[in-house]
Amino acid sequence: MQAGGSRELEARNYLQKHRIMELLSYLTSALLFFRPEKPREYLISILERLRIAKITGVAFPFFMDHSNIVAMFEMMDTSSKGTISFVQYKEALKTLGLLNKDEVLIDDGHIITLDKFRAEVNKRTEEIWSSF
């Protein structure tokens, strides 16, 4: 029984060390957001761009461009106030695969504007890609 527990622990440590679950979560989120006609080819292209960025030192691929971020923000800002709630903000980050399941965000009481939302999405995306 111990050997099975040890192998499970080794597997979990391996996945954590290489941040595989976060990578898969982000890839799945990107896949569901863009819904490409050829999902396998799309995933391969993402991983290839990531590999090239890592080798060459060029900027990591951002899959949420400005128009995508604006569209997502506007879907949440149904009253067109230019702000979204903290709950909407947190859920959007989860949906995009940019919030770790163990991460706790603290509501600081500040409103979430498009600029803040865009900056956070871009910052978290870069942090994720740079770790792979």
Image (cartoon, rainbow, N blue to C red):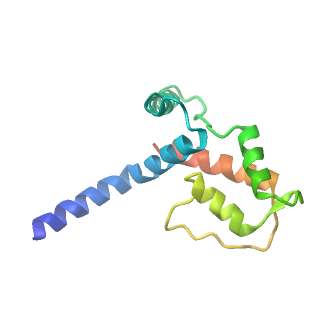
- Where, by quadrant of the figure, is residue 6 drawn? bottom left
Quarter of the image for the N terminus: give it: bottom left
Residue 126 percent coordinates (x, y): 60, 44
- Where, by quadrant of the figure, is residue 2 drawn? bottom left
Above or below for 55 versus 33: above
Report the front residue among 41 and 22. 41
Residue 117 percent coordinates (x, y): 74, 54
Above or below for 48 versus 34: above
- Residue at 84% x, 60% y: name it: 83
- Residue at 72% x, 49% y: name it: 72
- Residue at 59% x, 55% y: name it: 95
Left-right relation of 93 to 67: left
Q: Residue furthest front?
A: 37
- Where, by quadrant of the figure, is residue 132 drawn? top left
Report the front residue among 58 and 102. 102
Above or below for 70 versus 49: below
Left-right relation of 128 to 65: left
- Residue at 87% x, 57% y: name it: 82
Marks counted in the figure total 0
Report the front residue among 82 and 47. 82
